[in-house]
Amino acid sequence: MSTLFSENPLFSEVRSDFIDHRRFTSAEFARLEMERLWTSTWHWACREEELPRVGDYLVYDIGDQSVVLVHSSEDVIEAFHNVCPHRGRRLLSGTGQVNKFHCIFHAWQWDLHGNNTRILDQEQWQGCANMSREDMAMARIHVGRWAGFVFINMSVEPEPFEEFIKPAPQDLNVLRMDLMRLNWRKIINVKCNWKVAQEAFMESYHVWGTHPQFLQLNDDVNISYAAGKHGKHRWIYELPPGSPSRRLGKEPLGLDEVRENFAKLQLAFADQLGLGNGDGQFTARSLRAAHEAISVLPKGTSMMEAMTVAGIAMKEAADRDGAYFPLIPPEHLATMGHDWNIFPNLGVVWGADGTLIFRARPDPEDPCNPNVCVLEMISLLHFGNDNGKGKQPPLGEVDDVVDDWKNQRERIPKLLLQDLINMEEVQRGMHSVGLKGLRPNPVQEVQISNFHRVINEYLFA
Ligand code: FES
Ligand SMILES: [Fe+2]
């Protein structure tokens, strides 16, 4: 066996420049993740807007575990294992509205707080141990909430959510994602490990190779950090937006050319990362407004002024729709990170008045198969108020199950399709006997090595 491989049969070796690829291909490793990671860590389950009214519930499946989340009383969301304590039937599926939980097998019932309210013929258990109404409550799961995201943790005594989520709120609260709402969500079965899919959004080192259409419009060199259990990376900002990639080795562009590129960049975001009218990472509303405002600036206008004008135009367009628009102080913008991964699988690739969200999970139909996952690509937006033109679509119209993505490419934003194509090819490559381990970039892919280090904390601590 190669000396590069860890002697540990569970493939635990992780360095900033080395990751054992069998972590992505081993069924044993996948089983270990199911037993020790998903049932122990905080992780994102749903958005608050998916449970708008008291009585709304949804079922969230993670591998072979199933969880019911319910809006149980005013501004309270509770979570329970989706299983009946009588004979183990799953209680619910999908989404819906209830005023109590009811098991259709033998008709036991619970209120929305999981308290048992009916055991049919209860007197027949008289004298049996651990058969009180309290014992037969639904099994509770811890809930944490941040920025409109509802997290769960199945461990009995989890670390405090406020500690887990640090330092993400400090950097990202400026976006007011709590006010954003679901715009579209693509649910895609992908033939790759969940970590391969998640990692596609944990670095921008791949832009040069995978997304060359952006190289004329933006410098793609970036830097990556660990951020607690999470990770982030950001552009370096040595060149103003609109500058071509420094790797192209071009003579520096003139001021007016950079500004024209900056205007084009707005349209490229709508074209490459949006759907339909262009809503995706940003609202099409703000991208159009920025493009128009930059395009009419006189020759010689500085990039600093162009960026200020673009920000004001976006904010004014949002104001006209009654929508929120975050004004981010430049010193905060410089360090907050553009692409985040909240451990383990909440990818946040934010725009300004929108964000893309990426979540890959083991396939609930085949939870310990390391070669398959369910990937969700999501757009959240700051919609207008009821009088605004950009009202949120009904929740029922948000989801799009893309069951054959290779033949349904038009349903996926162009740039994300390029990422998707990589994923299955990476998974195939990981099985090669010629591969001696993965060699992440120790500067631009720190997020990924940190991600694996944190996974190890759960698997091997
Ligand atoms: S399994 Fe639920 S009531 Fe019997
Ligand atoms: Fe990408």
Image: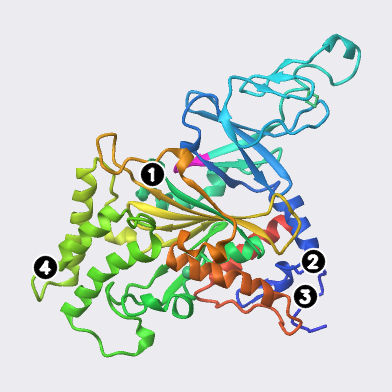
First-in-chain label (4 vs 1): 1
Q: Front-most of 56 and 72?
A: 56
* Quarter containing the N terminus: bottom right
Picture layout, residue 460 above or below residue 259: above
Q: Residue furthest right?
A: 127
Report the magenta residues as a range: 145-149
Q: CA distance from mark 3 to mark 4?
A: 58 Å
Q: CA distance from mark 4 to mark 2?
A: 59 Å
Residue 460 visible (yes or no)? no
**As displayed, is residue 266 above or below residue 86?**
below
Amino acid of disc 1: Met
Residue occupied by mark 2 = 10
Tell me if mark 3 has few (under 14), some (14-19) or many (20+) residues whose alpha carbon lies within 10 angstroms of its own: some
Do callouts 3 and 4 mark residues in contact (Cβ within 8 Å)?
no
Query: Does mark 3's beta carbon lie closer than 8 Å to ligand 2?
Result: no
Image quarter for residue 46?
A: top right
Earlier sequence position, callout 4 versus callout 2:
2
Whether residues under marks 2 and 1 lie with C-beta atoms below 8 angstroms apart, the answer is no
Disc 4: which residue? 297
Q: Earlier in the sequence, mark 2 or mark 1?
A: 2
Of the four image quadrants, the one with ligand 1 is: top right
